[in-house]
Amino acid sequence: ALNGDAKTMNFLQEVVDIMLAYIVESFDRSTKVIDFHYPNELLQRNNWELSDEPETLDDILISCRATFTYEVAPVFVLLEYVTLKKMREIIGWQDGRGDGIFSPGGAISNMYAMLLARYKMFPEVKEKGMSSVPRLVAFTSEHSHFSIKKGAAALGIGTESVICIKADERGKMIPSDLERRIIEAKQKGYVPFFVSATAGTTVYGAFDPLMAIADICKKHDIWMHVDGAWGGSLLMSRKHRWKLNGVERANSMTWNPHKMMAVPLQCSALLVREEGLMQSCNQMQACYLFQQDKQYDLSYDTGDKALQCGRHVDIFKLWLMWRAKGTIGFEAQIDKCLELSEYLYNKIKDREGYEMVFDGKPQHTNVCFWYLPPGVRYLEDKVEKMKRLHKVAPVIKARMMEYGTTMVSYQPQGDKVNFFRMVISNPAATFEDIDFLIEEIERLGQDL
Amino acid sequence: ALNGDAKTMNFLQEVVDIMLAYIVESFDRSTKVIDFHYPNELLQRNNWELSDEPETLDDILISCRATFTYEVAPVFVLLEYVTLKKMREIIGWQDGRGDGIFSPGGAISNMYAMLLARYKMFPEVKEKGMSSVPRLVAFTSEHSHFSIKKGAAALGIGTESVICIKADERGKMIPSDLERRIIEAKQKGYVPFFVSATAGTTVYGAFDPLMAIADICKKHDIWMHVDGAWGGSLLMSRKHRWKLNGVERANSMTWNPHKMMAVPLQCSALLVREEGLMQSCNQMQACYLFQQDKQYDLSYDTGDKALQCGRHVDIFKLWLMWRAKGTIGFEAQIDKCLELSEYLYNKIKDREGYEMVFDGKPQHTNVCFWYLPPGVRYLEDKVEKMKRLHKVAPVIKARMMEYGTTMVSYQPQGDKVNFFRMVISNPAATFEDIDFLIEEIERLGQDL
Ligand SMILES: Cc1ncc(COP(=O)(O)O)c(C=O)c1O
Ligand SMILES: Cc1ncc(COP(=O)(O)O)c(C=O)c1O
């Protein structure tokens, strides 16, 4: 879709017309309340597959019409089924087998993974609670997302039982430190049950070494989760997917299409290698909701494996985008974003007044750097310099927001003072936009 | 809005035009990236209040335009703030004080409540996990929603620590049984920490006696939660809100606008009486996300009190509907649905071939009944009769789905065989629709 051109606008207007027609029809009492079809029947009736190549805009309109025609839930359950299977194939699990669910965000997907790992090792926890099991410990890198700790707090595991593994200066988990801490925990009588490796850390965009971590998890018989909320989408890029080598050995993976794939919030998937586990972990025998005498194939009845009861339809937008772009469309978007971030990196790495937060080419689109205004750049007193530098990014950002010209976030990390973290996830950005960003930083920060 | 008439369609088209204009503008590189305003400033700049009376359609269009103009998050955070406060006022908490969050559904809202209750009593659980605390027990009626048990399983409390309190034949929790079980649990050395009363049970639509339950919770110093996912909206009806008398004494309440208020899924609120608790329970010190040196009032920074990280915007549709209908609009809708269900009840309670599952007028819109086709009606053998009756509702429903004429769900409950549960939540339904439903049941079931 190009810049608001006629073709795009016509297409959008046609989609709107389909929806308005759907609304008007729903007022007509002579139409059916539902036009029910069994999921298997739907599967045969239309082509719902996701392929490498994009479909035409006309095909997309046909898909929209078909989707609004069938009763709401079955068709979306079917789309979830098709899409999760496709994602598992991309991960590399045999024949796309396994399980999964769309959840309201990566934080919840990570929590699901921890819940499953605990249940896998100690199924009695479901009925008897944490007091029936030994002290469990989980492992994740010090650069991991805070949702791992939030999950541990919620699940009654406790944040102190999340052991933070050291990361190297590029933000990657150090496998030898992981193994050391696992052994140490065992010696204390604790039970290691969960390792969460991160594929694309929030701040540095680092990819933990999944192969080495998988070896350790296998050796110590621990559930391996990959938090690919941010970096998982790189699996769709032939150029970049090597960064996730080893993910096929994980027991579960979080992958957020609502981040790098630009699907509107919310759209997050948890993918699980073992089939049936989610169901037995989360089902609750509420006979009034999940009738065993229903008239259709219950394998599509996904309600009981969720923590949620009603669920928002997050799948349709992803499925439709996938049809419209094809896998190669997503790949092109992702490659473009990575190219833009490399351009930014190359532009500033040796530029006067800039300093990179870590060495080397960024692995994801996160480019982390300091801008040192002339007034700070030449300060001799190190302490004073850091104190002043810490205040630079917040002021520049505040000015950017005031002018509304551009946006870039910043944060401190460990003992590092506030730095800029430029994250590119909009493939419509251009090299000129990157040039402009640098000009703006210098324009707004030179007097500091 | 009337049946797809010109005024409605024009209005919808205008909303669409606003959105399309927003999309086109976003392609224009000369426009601001953001038009940032501090939440306090936004609060003063426009009138965002929710009132009894509806606004005009023109005002709604102005609201849509204003909302799309401001940077996304701050304006929605503001709308959440205004709406949660309004909901707390309706509950009856002083000056609408307290806390709350929009969560992805009633099941998750209930889980939040349990998490808060546990944290309130044992804050150390956050760091040290469940192994640091005595055995906790929760109480809820046997008719409560299964999400209470799902929550307990997830939080590491265990389903066996959810004690099911007897309900009377109308589905209401029996307070004396609650108190008896609390005392019993204490004698065993367990710590009662949470009572979940239901306001509008899923199957019968029953309202637990909140006043009596509040007395018991107060006496034993236990967190009182009200699961009003389904029945909470009756608070907006002057005619029906007495059914929730005592809710103002609860510590927390789940209220799902996406059910009875007909807001599209998902839209669920958890309301909490104590301020600050959610924040300390769930915050995780991820300094790279929630900067302390941000340039605006942090009291609007709601991210850290959620289990989620990114959150879908669920507030806008509710807020907009509230503006368009006013509180009295919601009230009229709710009263209408209850009137329709009473009509259905009156129609079948003495009708040949029907039997009510429980006696008396339904308190919510759930009407639970058996239809006994002539071939079953006169069977002498009680066991055979129940066996045959159990199969009636599934067959009739399957036939309804085939014809697409109407929809009604069914389920067994306890030792009761499958019965129909007609739930009315669409105020556009008419008395004729109810008549039609009965005709259809008889038409499709008479040969059984
Ligand atoms: C690595 C990582 N994991 C998990 C999350 C949480 O994802 P969500 O915001 O969808 O809950 C994030 C979000 O920034 C993330 O960067
Ligand atoms: C009483 C009650 N509580 C909680 C829920 C769960 O709500 P949600 O589907 O929004 O998760 C329901 C849903 O039917 C309910 O009836």
Image (tube, coloured by chain):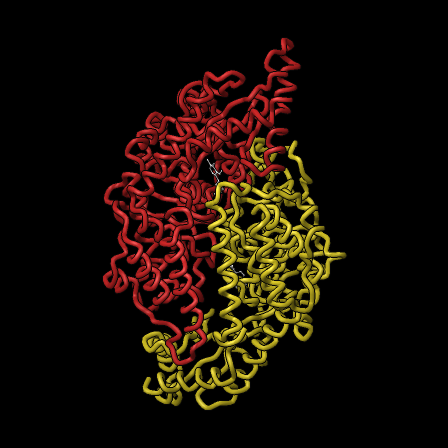
Chain colours: A yellow, B red
Image position, residue B42 (x, y; %)? 28, 63
Image position, residue A280 (x, y; %)? 65, 40
| Residue A407 visible from this viewpoint | yes
Vertical side of A221 occupied by B395: above or below: above
Vertical side of A221 occupied by A394: above or below: below
Q: Quadrant of residue B294?
A: bottom left
- As drawn, the residue found furthest toward the right would be A94
In-image side of B75 versus B387 (left or right): left
Vertical side of A390 occupied by B395: above or below: above
Vertical side of B159 occupied by B304: above or below: below
In-image side of B57 versus B226 (left or right): left
Residue that appears at 66% across and 71% down: A328
Residue that appears at 32% across and 75% down: A402
In-image side of B49 versus A309 (left or right): left
**Total marks placed:** 0
Give the camera-side residue of B249 and B443. B443
Give the camera-side residue of A257 and B379. B379
Residue that appears at 40% across and 83% down: A441
Give the camera-side residue of A37 and A76. A37
Q: Quadrant of residue A286?
A: top right
In-image side of B40 versus B393 (left or right): left
Image position, residue B248 (x, y; %)? 30, 36
| Residue B119 visible from this viewpoint | no
- As drawn, the residue found furthest toward the top would be B380
Point out the image quarter for the C terminus of chain B: top right
Image position, residue B169 (x, y; %)? 46, 19
